[in-house]
Amino acid sequence: DFSEEVLFTSHDHEFVATVANRIIEFTPNGVIDRSMTFEEYLEDANVQQQRDQLYESRVELQL
């Protein structure tokens, strides 16, 4: 058992699902911070609703 904290980012789904027990997502309009597994985070209806709201007002730059 590892009792310390580790902050990491990864594109490896299996790694995140195995290691993470708290998810912090930084969006353009706020932060979502949940103590749950990655799979629970992806499947949680409340998290999805919050993500939709936080990304809804995102403005795309037209170059």
Image (cartoon, grey):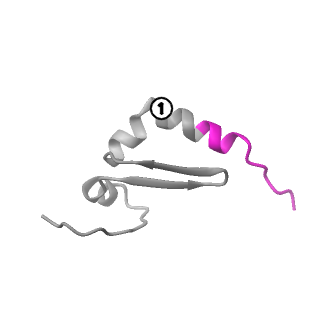
For the record, the magenta segment spans: 52-63
Tell whether position 55 is magenta: yes
What residue sits 46% from the left and 30% below the top? 45
Secondary structure found at label 1: helix
Residue 38 spot, x, y in % from top left = 35, 48
**Amino acid at the residue labelled 1:** Asn
Horizontal side, residue 40 vs residue 27: left or right: left
Q: Name the quadrant of the N terminus.
A: bottom left
Towards the viewer: 32 or 62: 32
State left or right for residue 38 relative to residue 58.
left
Residue situated furthest left in the rendering: 1
Residue 57 shown in magenta: yes
Q: Is residue 11 above or below residue 30?
A: below
Left or right, residue 34 beside residue 14: right
> What residue sits right under mark 1 in the picture?
46
Q: Position of residue 56 (x, y in %)?
A: 69, 40
Looking at the image, the residue that sits furthest to the top is 45
